[in-house]
Image (cartoon, rainbow, N blue to C red):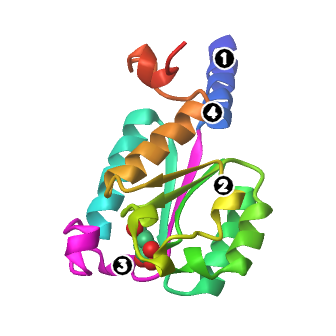
Amino acid sequence: MAEVVISCAAIAFAESTTMRLMILNGPNLNLLGVREPHIYGTTTLASIKASCEEFARFAGAQLSFHQSNNEGVLVDIIQSAREQADAIIINPAGYSFTSIAMLDALKMFEGPIFEVHISNIHARDELHRHSKLSSAVKAVVAGLAPYGYIVAMQAALQAAGTLPESLPAPIRLGPK
Ligand code: DHK
């Protein structure tokens, strides 16, 4: 009987410490792979999703992965993160430069937010250079190609102290 009680407590602990990551992708990212490959490369969104899922499995994190071309849908998903996620990783794509509605929704999320851009938006044309959403996020990863999603996941898990113990100290803790 005592054994049953202990294992129930262990399950409850494991559930309460599982990091819930939400990855959110904005408009036109469904066409990654064929879309302006000289800027965004040839990796598809399905491949990015599979890679993020593999990393989440390795790290023992929960992952939900979304894409929408619709600003209102993206606002709804960001609002749902208030209940369903501990951290948001968002590539707002074209809405980076226009969406006050998404900025307002992100500001209501209490956990850390990581903004990802596949390209280095700071080295691009004037229209693609100034994200309106960055003021609401903890960090911006730009220019690392699809690997930026993995870096953002790692940063979110590191900030929460939930990177696997098996990783070397510089990755788990950074420089002392
Ligand atoms: C993706 C887009 O769709 C553009 O509108 C942004 C971003 C850049 C990216 O690099 O992932 O400017």
Which quadrant of the frame does ligand 1 lie within? bottom left
x, y (%) of residue 2?
69, 12
Is residue 19 found left or right of 165 in the rendered image?
right
Reply above or below: 33 against 147.
Answer: below
The residue carrying pointer 2 sits among few (fewer than 14), some (14 to 19) or many (20 or more) residues within 10 Å by Cα, namely some
Range covered by the magenta-colored residues: 19-43
Q: Which image quadrant is residue 17 in? A: top right
Give the class, few, some or many, for how many residues have Cα within 10 Å of label 1's Cα (few <14, many ≥20): few
Q: Is residue 38 magenta?
A: yes
Of the residues tagged 2 and 1, which is closer to the observer?
A: 2
Q: Which residue is mark 3?
A: 30
Where, quadrant-wise, is the N terminus in this rendering?
top right
What's the CA distance linking mark 4 and mark 1?
Answer: 26 Å
Residue 6 numbered mark, or none: 1
Marks 3 and 1 sit apart, C-alpha to C-alpha, by 45 Å
Mark pair 4, 2: CA separation: 15 Å
Q: Nearer the viewer, residue 78 or 36?
A: 36
Q: CA distance from mark 3 to mark 4?
A: 29 Å
Amino acid, disc 2: Val
The amino acid type found where label 3 is placed reads Asn
Q: Secondary structure at mark 2?
A: loop
Q: Nearer the viewer, residue 94 or 122?
A: 122
Q: Which mark is residue 160?
A: 4
Q: Are marks 4 and 1 in contact (CB under 8 Å)?
A: no
Q: Find numbered disc 3 in the image and state the secondary structure of the residue it sits on.
A: helix
